[in-house]
Image (spheres, helix red, strand yellow):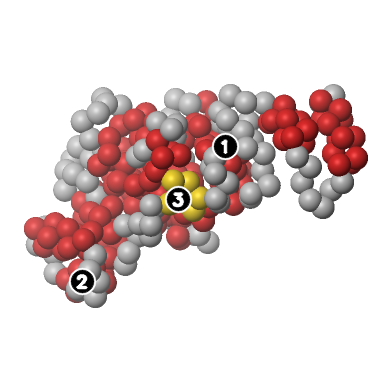
Amino acid sequence: MVLLCVLCGGANVEQCVNGKEPGSSVCTELVDLYEKHGKRRSQVDDKGIARHLSSDSEDSSPLQTAASELADECTLPDDQASCDKAIWLAGLLEKLTEGTSAEPIAEASKVSLLATWFKNPAGPGGFFNFVDVDRSGSLSADELSAHNAGDLMQLIDIDDDGQASRKECRDFLRGCVVLFKKLPTLDADLARATIPVMLEDADTVTMASTVATGPSSNPLSVAVSELERSCPEPAERASCDKAVPAVRSH
């Protein structure tokens, strides 16, 4: 069963269920499903929902189990927001991957583009800038679809404005780190990576200065190409011309 907190879209669950956000369609859906489980409105909270649904079935999926464990104990005590995001992502990823694969973790990793974000030569920041073709500082549905990542908008665009901002991407990636490090994996790189290191990588998505790098690109080659094409202010052309052979030598 899909975690009900996925339907909140990042909104406060209690506000949804107590009718304080009457214009929200996700809140309407949440109320209907929540009441179907016979819970009183006065007893609503995100963590309670995760625990309640996880216990509904003895055959809970890995995503449900991870969400329930995070609801009981946050992996990052000083960053509850990332744990809450991970719980929310678990529910939505289960919904998006339902019936698509016999291996839910692998399918969730594929939908979230986990490897593409974190194994990019220039990190998540490089991948964001690579996808952001119009250099608007946010990712549109068309830009994501060009990389077969249309489902990412549902995972990232919390304010529903049709754009995935740098902040929304950062929150999404930090939630992914917490969630996927809670799940079993056969990916040796992910297994070795520590949460602090991955969180630092996630934060690079806020850096507009990071070289825009595709999944298989060499960031140094890209940097040389960009320097040859245009010299960023306040540097002078002569300085950029000197930098090009220095970068090439590496």
Q: Amino acid at mark 2?
A: Pro
Please indicate whether residue 181 sits to the left or right of residue 27 in the image. right
Residue where numbered disc 2 is placed? 22
Q: CA distance from mark 2 to mark 3?
A: 25 Å
Alpha-carbon neighbours of circle 3 within 10 Å: few (<14), some, or many (≥20)?
many
Q: Amino acid at mark 1?
A: Phe
Counting residues from the start of the chain, the first of labels 2 and 3 encountered is 2
Image height of 27 relative to 125, above or below? below
Q: Position of residue 36 (x, y in %)?
A: 9, 58
Residue where numbered disc 1 is placed? 130
Counting residues from the start of the chain, the first of labels 2 and 1 encountered is 2
Q: CA distance from mark 1 to mark 3?
A: 14 Å
Which residue sits at x=48%, y=26%? 187
Which residue sits at x=36%, y=38%? 150
Q: Quadrant of residue 48?
A: bottom left
Alpha-carbon neighbours of circle 2 within 10 Å: few (<14), some, or many (≥20)?
few
Element at label 3 = strand
Q: Amino acid at mark 3?
A: Ala
Q: CA distance from mark 2 to mark 1?
A: 39 Å
Question: Depth check: 101 or 155 in front?
Answer: 155
Question: Depth check: 188 or 58 in front?
Answer: 188
Q: Mark 1 and 3 residues: CB-CB less than 8 Å, in contact?
A: no
Residue where numbered disc 3 is placed? 164
Residue depth check, mark 2 versus mark 1: number of the one nearer the observer? 1
